[in-house]
Amino acid sequence: QVQLVESGGGLVQAGGSLRLSCAASGRTFSSQAMGWFRQAPGKEREFVAAITWSGSRMDYADSVKGRFTISGDNAKNTVYLQMNSLKPEDTAVYYCANRERFWVGLRVGYNYWGQGTQVTVSS
């Protein structure tokens, strides 16, 4: 089992920045990748960004490319999502996810999820 705890969400004006953190605990030695997903009201959950546990590969949704940066600190078992130039359409609950098995691509295969942290961007 892997436990994930997100933090860093909040209310920010459009154009502002936030950094989300996701601390992993438990069986982290078997982790293969960590990802961020988000779900806005009335919408399905969507992929945002992901990184392999080794840090060798990353992937971003087109909607956040160039504005968001994912990074990890293996010593702290923590993954970060730096969000810059935030837009009102980035408003959502952001979820951290972890997977143990290799999948082709970084957007699928996640089996552990955090509780989520709310990000609200005002216009």
Image (tube, rainbow, N blue to C red):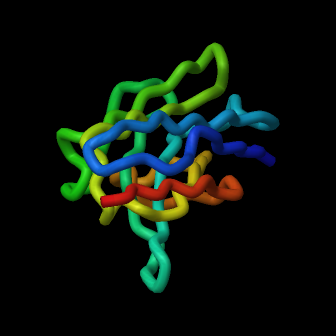
Looking at the image, residue 84 sits to the left or right of residue 73; the answer is: left
Please name whichever residue, 102 or 91, is drawn nearer the observer in this view of the structure: 91
Q: Is residue 68 above or below residue 115?
A: above
Residue 83, image quadrant: top left
Looking at the image, residue 110 sits to the left or right of residue 24; the answer is: left
Question: Is any part of residue 112 visible from this angle?
Answer: no
Q: Residue at x 37, y 58 (%)?
A: 122
- Quadrant (top left/top right/bottom left/bottom right) for the C terminus: bottom left
Q: Is residue 14 above or below residue 79?
A: below
Please name whichever residue, 70 or 58, is drawn nearer the observer in this view of the structure: 70
Residue 27, image quadrant: top right
Q: Give the number of marks.
A: 0
Q: Residue at x 61, y 53 (%)?
A: 117
Please name whichever residue, 40 or 78, is drawn nearer the observer in this view of the structure: 40
Question: Is any part of residue 109 visible from this angle?
Answer: yes
Where is residue 28? Give x, y as percent.
70, 33
